[in-house]
Image (cartoon, coloured by chain):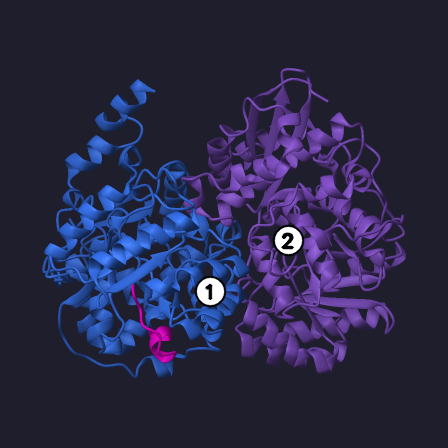
Chain colours: A blue, B purple
Amino acid sequence: MTKGKITKLSVSDVRFPTSLEQHGSDAMHTDPDYSVVYVVIETDGGLKGYGITFTIGRGTEIVVCAVEALSALVIGKSLEDIVSDFRSFYRLLTSDGQMRWIGPEKGVIQLATAAILNAIWDMWARAEGKPLWKLLVDMEPRQLIRCIDFRYLSDALTEQEALEEQMLKEGYPAYTTSCAWLGYSDEQLTELCSAALAEGWTKFKVKVGADLQDDIRRCSLIRKMIGPEKTLMIDANQRWDVAEAITWVTKLAEFRPLWIEEPTCPDDILGHAAISKALAPLGIGVATGEQCHNRVMFKQFLQASALQFVQIDSCRVGSVNENLATILMAAKFKVPVCPHAGGVGLCELVHHLSIFDYISVSASLDNRMCEYVDHLHEHFKSPTLIRNAHYMPPKDPGYSTEMFEESVKKHQFPDGEVWKSILEKK
Amino acid sequence: MTKGKITKLSVSDVRFPTSLEQHGSDAMHTDPDYSVVYVVIETDGGLKGYGITFTIGRGTEIVVCAVEALSALVIGKSLEDIVSDFRSFYRLLTSDGQMRWIGPEKGVIQLATAAILNAIWDMWARAEGKPLWKLLVDMEPRQLIRCIDFRYLSDALTEQEALEEQMLKEGYPAYTTSCAWLGYSDEQLTELCSAALAEGWTKFKVKVGADLQDDIRRCSLIRKMIGPEKTLMIDANQRWDVAEAITWVTKLAEFRPLWIEEPTCPDDILGHAAISKALAPLGIGVATGEQCHNRVMFKQFLQASALQFVQIDSCRVGSVNENLATILMAAKFKVPVCPHAGGVGLCELVHHLSIFDYISVSASLDNRMCEYVDHLHEHFKSPTLIRNAHYMPPKDPGYSTEMFEESVKKHQFPDGEVWKSILEKK
């Protein structure tokens, strides 16, 4: 496999001015400019890998700074050095004796780790000439296991058990969040929902949490449009305290949401457990994970029965390595994985993991689906392909992380032409 | 109170090359260069405030970058604007609609928040001509409560309850960690321990977790030197998995440690609860908190009986505001607060909070003490004063955060003279 050493790592601050049209708005993030930290690594033997992590505007430059700090641990290594003992490389990035302090394994430094490791996985898949999900599916169980850092997990999952997993094949169900961002008007909601129904969507998510009367009106509107059989989910983006979450969601129970997503602080395992327990009699599950910062948090959410849907994210935790650990734990605890996506590139990356989960781990589609949001795909060289509300397995080699050079150039912050013209007007 | 608006915020990357002599070494952080992100804020009315957060070398520049990003939220405000509705200002810093994503309330962005808010508290105390602990002690309960963001805490603590606290006065017991860093030889241990005994120290902490036989030898040595009556604590700095922690500490039980500190991942609440339960029959408590990233994590540690000693830190969470929340929750759950200190400036800052805790909240010294490490105090204008193993209440106005200009200049990374000469040799 050796194709030289990694001699170059470049990183860009790429922002899309999505706040101008309220795309992505929710109860806590009212004006997001969807952004990526975009990492390109190159070997002197001609290999390339592209990695991203997702951010929402201000602060992206801090993650760029963290990628630059971590880059010293990457430069000079070959892909083979890295993947032949991927667990050690993972730990090198996450447990540097000094930089560990400013995490550990959370926040900015973990986002930067995700961007770099996503680039490594993309390079690996390209070197093998396969899309990432196929690289994973074809991998020997022992090799897969060697990618995971089991530190702090051994009370819930050991290497031995993780080997007991299986195989199968198919396209992956998706649900849409594009219809009902918090900042959209009722007219927009109606129009977008009609269009989505016409396109064959059967599962819909609505943002809630800012105002109860608004939520009741919006949920009622959507439930009426989609009818009693289709699936509705609601998402509060961490807006409530524990008791408030229970009261509020109880008032929305008549619209029969499958889950309430992020009802409270993403760190509050015991709070989510209390909410899960209170809402179970109403048939409403709790979903969370897009801001769950590492595998140890997921372990506890599972141990405490604090969630009924595991929402892994491709860009917040330590890339495929850490998501593998979570997917295997979810399987052990018999909780479905329904990834968070949307943002910039999150759909492109994470459906590789859903497809792998189905073929090699869960072998089930019960209560399983992957989020889909229809924007910013046009900036990626291998965009997702949705057919009849299903993600079709990508065929291009890699992790679908590569962006068009032109897109990166235009949206570079603050000097790309898009931002130059916006900032000039301010 | 108005003395103009904050017109200037400067931030420095200040590092001390402590790894050269293995000061601060432990099982996870083998080569720390103790560092601070040093923030100076100034109003156009002549007020100044100094704030720090603590880091251990590489990555400090990332926190500096985060402080720069947050500074836009500070510039232009008056001290009165801020402290008259401190909760809102706290939330402005921690819940900016875009920057929140890269935390939330954890890691780099929370360390940066801590540095800025520490400077605000220092400025406030200086403006009132009081040391910080005295500012807190003199404050009306309602005013104190208005500094706390209760979001996500209402299931454990409400504003109403928090008002029910009292008063008293005295110096604060300290324990020393200076004798037994992991990288020290047995000769160094013996020498430092003798000196500490001669100085009147009665409580000693030993770093463990890298090698069991070493730990047995070192604990045995220290226990023999200090005799059966004095207090011994042990600290693994997150080295173990859950079952491993229980087995390992059981083997050290004969040396009767009061607590095992950071036995496993700082995020693992349920793991700490399991360890607490297993070690309770041996009379060993669990202590943690120095890397506990926010009040919601402390809430759960308390709810789950996962710790018997709450180790707040002055620089990891959202300054005095967030520590007030934790101190009040600890009082409600009847768990002693024994702050983490050492590092750079952590002793200087946190003993203000211990003294406040004693006078206004716990009114008890049972099983309560504040960590002390004897280095780098000489760089601070109001260094801690230890008398007979007790912290004496500071008298200078402020939060004891101000450093000597010369110290900052010399240790600025990478251009100060100390680093210039070290880096030239590399």
> Element at badge 1?
helix
Given residues A373 and A404, the one toward you in this image is A373
Name the residue: 43% across, 45% down: A28
Which residue matches tag 1? A297
Q: Quadrant of the N terminus of chain A?
A: bottom left
Instruction: Please say if A135 is above or below A76.
Output: below
The answer to whether residue A31 shows anywhere in this view is yes
- Give the percent coordinates (x, y) of residue B28: 55, 61
Task: Specify whether B213 is left or right of A227.
Answer: right
Q: Amino acid at mark 2?
A: Gly
Task: Specify whether A152 is left or right of A229.
Answer: right
- Give the percent coordinates (x, y) of residue B349: 72, 42
Q: Quadrant of the C terminus of chain A?
A: top left
Q: Amino acid at mark 1?
A: Met
Instruction: Please say if B74 is above or below B140.
Output: above
For disc 2, the chain is B
Q: Given contact means CB atoms under 8 Å apart, are the residues at marks 2 and 1 in contact?
A: no
Mark nearest the camera among 2 and 1 is: 1
Q: Is residue B292 magenta?
A: no
The answer to whether residue B402 shows anywhere in this view is no
For disc 1, the chain is A
Disc number for residue B24: 2
Q: Magenta span covers which residues?
A: A328-338
Name the residue: 40% across, 54% down: A236
Instruction: Please say if B210 is above or below A168.
Output: above
Q: Is residue A333 magenta?
A: yes
- Give the percent coordinates (x, y) of residue B31: 56, 53
